Image (tube, grey):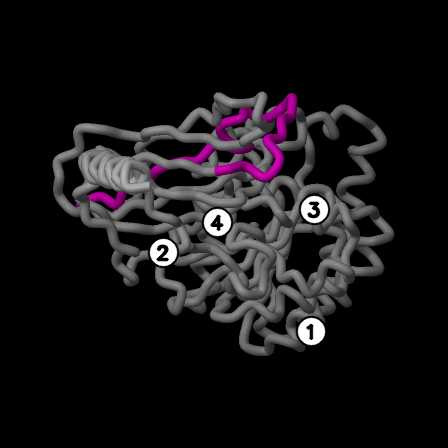
Amino acid sequence: MKKLTLLLSLLLCAAASAAADSPVKYVDATELRLINRGFDTEQMLTPYTRLPRDIADSVRPTLWERSQCSAGIGVRFATDSRSVGVRYKLLWNTHMIHMADTGLKGTDLYIFGADSTWHYVNTNRPYIKDRAKDSMQVAATYVENLDGDMHEYMIYFPLYDGLTELQVAVDSAAVITPGNPDILRRDAGRVVGYGTSILHGGCASRTGMCPTNIISRELDREVINIGISGEAKMDLPMARTLARIPDVSVFLIDPVPNCTLDQCDSLTYGFVSTLLKLRPDVPVLMVEGPMYPYAHYNSYFRDYLPSKNRAFFKHFRQLQQDFPGRVFYVTNTNLDGPEDDGTVDGIHLTDLGFRHYADKITPALRAILTAKTPPTGVFE
């Protein structure tokens, strides 16, 4: 018995010594600052999903499933570590034929520079080593040989997969904190984006190029991504759910690509007016549906897509009359680029397409936030 006790003591000491000598420590993202979430952790199934669990029975199963993607969510922190990495477990380990895995289930690291601008550092390639055990675990180092000074960082989470856990990897002796709360301030008033696979982030090659993430960096405020691929059909339960999100300055509504002509005509007014009534303090920016490149040549879609936009715009004008000064509209001119060069498949956007999209949407949001909107309420 004494020998067994001695052996256990030696093993414990060895384990403690190994841990102390480890060059890396892992800090759970929940101990840092999670950003771009509409709801607190206790309202959701996990810290990395996007809709509260109490609406699961009120929406379509496909909508609920896609809301489990961690699109737009990220973690903010500051550290003096000379290396920064990540370790996380995926929810599904999904794959799509038209989207890079780095955007679908990878993560991006950004650093806040001396010029008060976010700069891209690196992306991890989401390779799962132990597929036989179905561990779903990904681990990678973004950068090494840093200067050892304290810097502000941000990691963006997977766009079309979910997470069950995520840790930031830093040097074992490094200091790591939730970061400066004055950067990407929640209390500055957040933007909530509701829309289709385009808003969701399909098909960005990496997570930092998701449109809500680009807009967030440029406006220096949190932007919440409620892009639900294929499911932005202006369901009233979703309008009521969006209205529950606190600290919102603008609602960005971009549902037309997922809606039929009848839905654009019958659901637009009810959906947007529900938001306006439940949140009388928050304006709404409605985004016109894109004209897909092939629609210029396909005679059916050349007529059908503009007809959906006409129905959407008709209800915008009525909403303008009923809610003066609170409803605005962005046309689709150059929404995916001046030369229709911004898609991967004629519909979903590349990184270039998302750059065009953000360049169109960001000035409109900034104008609303600063009360410098056009007299017509329409951003051409």
What is the CA distance from the residue labelled 4 to the residue labelled 1?
A: 35 Å
Which sits earlier in the primary sequence, circle 3 or circle 2? 2
What is the CA distance from the residue labelled 4 to the residue labelled 2?
A: 15 Å
Which sits earlier in the primary sequence, circle 4 or circle 1? 4
Residue at the image position 20 percent from the left and 37 percent from the top: 17
Which sits earlier in the primary sequence, circle 4 or circle 3? 3
Q: Which residue is mark 3?
A: 65
What is the CA distance from the residue labelled 2 to the residue labelled 1?
A: 47 Å
Local secondary structure at mark 3:
helix
Residue at the image position 69 percent from the left and 69 percent from the top: 240
Q: Which residue is mark 1?
A: 321
- Looking at the picture, how far across and down is residue 359, in whole percent? 46, 43
Amino acid at dot 2:
Glu
Which sits earlier in the primary sequence, circle 2 or circle 1? 2
Would residue 85 be visible to someone looking at this image? yes
Q: Nearer the viewer, residue 103 or 22?
A: 22
Left or right of residue 355, residue 31 in this image: left
Q: Which residue is mark 2?
A: 31
Would residue 15 be visible to someone looking at this image? no
What is the CA distance from the residue labelled 3 to the residue labelled 2?
A: 26 Å
Q: Which residue is mark 4?
A: 73
Amino acid at dot 4:
Ile
Residue at the image position 48 percent from the left and 64 percent from the top: 368
Amino acid at dot 1:
Gln
Residue at the image position 44 percent from the left and 35 percent from the top: 107
Range of residues picked out in magenta: 89-114
| Image quadrant where one finds the N terminus | top left
Q: Nearer the viewer, residue 238 or 77?
A: 77
Q: Badges 4 and 2: C-beta atoms under 8 Å apart?
A: no
Left or right of residue 373, residue 231 in this image: right
